[in-house]
Image (cartoon, coloured by chain):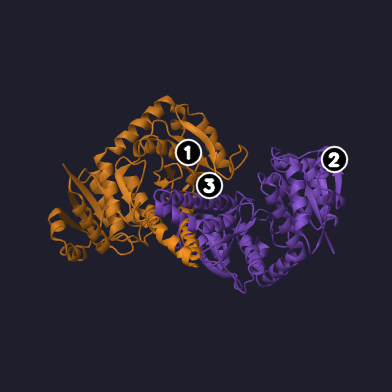
Chain colours: A purple, B orange
Amino acid sequence: MTTILALDAMGGDIGPKVVVEGAAMALSRSTQRSLSFLLFGDKTLIQAELDKFPDLRQKSTIIHTDILITNDTKPAAAVRMGRKSNLGMAVDAVAKGQAHAVVSAGNTGAYMALSKILLKTLKGIDRPAIPAVMPTIKGKTVVLDLGANIDCSAENLVQFALMGEAFSRQILNLEHPSVGLLNIGSEDLKGNATVQKAAQLLKDIQDLNFSGFVEGNDITAGTTDVVVTDGFSGNIVLKAIEGAAHLFKHLLEKSLSSSWLGKLGYLLARSCFKEFKARIDPRFYNGAVFLGLKHIAVKSHGGTDSIGFANAIHVAVQMAESNLIDKIEQRLNLMANAESSILDHA
Amino acid sequence: MTTILALDAMGGDIGPKVVVEGAAMALSRSTQRSLSFLLFGDKTLIQAELDKFPDLRQKSTIIHTDILITNDTKPAAAVRMGRKSNLGMAVDAVAKGQAHAVVSAGNTGAYMALSKILLKTLKGIDRPAIPAVMPTIKGKTVVLDLGANIDCSAENLVQFALMGEAFSRQILNLEHPSVGLLNIGSEDLKGNATVQKAAQLLKDIQDLNFSGFVEGNDITAGTTDVVVTDGFSGNIVLKAIEGAAHLFKHLLEKSLSSSWLGKLGYLLARSCFKEFKARIDPRFYNGAVFLGLKHIAVKSHGGTDSIGFANAIHVAVQMAESNLIDKIEQRLNLMANAESSILDHA
């Protein structure tokens, strides 16, 4: 079976060049499966890039539009431009069943708004969230939301917890993942009204393995399999962890380069640095899914290169092939039936 | 001149043992200056610990109270217990001029509430904030607030920016420190209404070197000398950075221990690990000042040991000796005169 991908060719800081190169890279990597692409945007610009990759050209169709959503377009304006824009057409192709998944490096707010309208959210979910799979001391932890939702209600956080739990079951292959709520302390008294209310609601969900509040250091400690937070703190915390890894590497290199023995130590430790760097390289975990939609929409970082965009495509293909959304929907329905009061309330 | 410290002997997870041991350690370290201590709390418990340290006993006075604020006491209840409690008496000793500074490892909310009431805030400051000095790739950056204020208005953030700027001038010895506002993106459109309003207000302060929005990774990159955020995000982000450093160390050790050469590399790199570990060891930067008060109140982490508590005392002594609060007050007044509209509004 061919997996058809709808690509917003104009999204991101660079546009068609990165998108087309990324698609070519993803195609060349896809030995076991068949991929084809729908490219939405300015035909002339896209064609010029596509002509550089004959294999990809064979598998691609360009759908032209003059109505272009860029990184500067406000979400409200993007919604008005809607189905006739590059981004809207790409999303709509999935809604209409013409493609299995959409990938865009465009403006997050605009992409999210159009995806919510055209792809609809799963039952019981008001707003999609972006999860990340973080390396931890124990293994891996799903953290969400990473920036799709700046202001969150307690009910939003509860829904993120349910989605995160269902997602981690599939992605991390866990039987009964534990879920923590990010806060400034683990005591019940701590935090703002939103997290306190969310914790109360989560405690009442019997089928959920809720571990209560966790703190910033618990993320990389791997204290819980899922860490739930609003998109503001989540985005800041993910970037801070990336930054801390860079600082550690910098300090270690500086310290080691000060002596002959240190330099030798650095040389020996170098492959480990590389390994770690790869683990935290944003390009290799680029491709964040909008969790909670009825279809697959993957967001690539706007500033990524073609390697990063290829990885975002890879994420979309994997999701399509593993029927991830169906499985998450089944799990959410199961919990909704058991705890109808919670989800109805939300 | 003798520096007199008011210590809440009952605060923290362990109470008198850690506080008294910490005081003894601080005293033995203070070769060039003279210290004396007022210890507030249960006389019997404190005396038992004090008898272990004859030098400290000579320099200490116990002030007994039966009204004890513990880590479980809610701020509102602590305020009601007020001046007659261990914590309230310790804070009040500074307000009355009987001590130069107060140090407590007790409940942050209760301590903050009592300090605001008894010690009062500086002109133009509504709520004190807790700053941290973080290691960065470029040197050091002041980050605030680290958890004193969970819900912050735009005006609170503006005041944190002014206090952080004044603080970094003194602590980091900078001429014209740059100030960034923590957000989920550097574009003007990003973030919630609070950070957007705060950015607008900060742009209008002519004498402030405001650099606009910074992101999570900018903290350890050292992009700006000061990073301003609310206490919720600030607390989470600081702990996440600590956690990331532990993860990095763990992965590196694991990776290096897998081969003979790797083990050698680890051995050579070990002193660097130690150096870094010390830099991020919470005990060595334990002792967070409530910035924005008219007197010196230092908060020790509740779970710290005597080394950590000694360091908190050291911070209080340094602040007292350097007249830090006077200098910050002068700077705030200077900016307030130049920008009276901003501070009057706040």
Rate crowding at label 2 as few (under 14), some (14 to 19) or many (20 or more) other CA atoms within 10 Å: some
In percent of width and height, residue B50 lies at 17, 62
**Numbered disc 2: what chain?**
A
In percent of width and height, residue A177 lies at 59, 70
Query: Which is nearer the eye, B147 or A325?
Result: A325
Q: Residue at x 47, y 36 (%)?
A: B179
Of badges 1 and 2, the one in the foreground is 2
- Kindly report the distance in space between the C-alpha atoms of the residues bearing marks 1 and 3: 11 Å
> Badges 3 and 2: C-beta atoms under 8 Å apart?
no
Q: In the picture, which quadrant includes the C terminus of chain B?
A: top left
Q: Do discs 1 and 3 belong to a common subunit? A: yes
Question: What kind of residue is marked 1?
Answer: Thr
- Kindly report the distance in space between the C-alpha atoms of the residues bearing marks 1 and 2: 42 Å
In percent of width and height, residue A159 lies at 64, 61
Does the rendering let one see residue B232?
no
Q: Secondary structure at mark 1?
A: loop
Q: Residue at x 22, y 63 (%)?
A: B42
In this figure, which residue is indicated by the disc labeled 1? Answer: B224
In this figure, which residue is indicated by the disc labeled 2? Answer: A43
> Badges 1 and 3: C-beta atoms under 8 Å apart?
no
Question: What kind of residue is marked 3?
Answer: Asn
Question: What kind of residue is marked 2?
Answer: Lys
Using the rendered view, name the quadrant where residue A261 is placed.
bottom left
In this figure, which residue is indicated by the disc labeled 3? Answer: B217
- Kindly report the distance in space between the C-alpha atoms of the residues bearing marks 3 and 2: 37 Å
In the picture, measured across the screen, residue A118 lies left or right of residue B281, that is right
In percent of width and height, residue B290 lies at 36, 46
Decide: is B238 above or below B51.
Answer: above
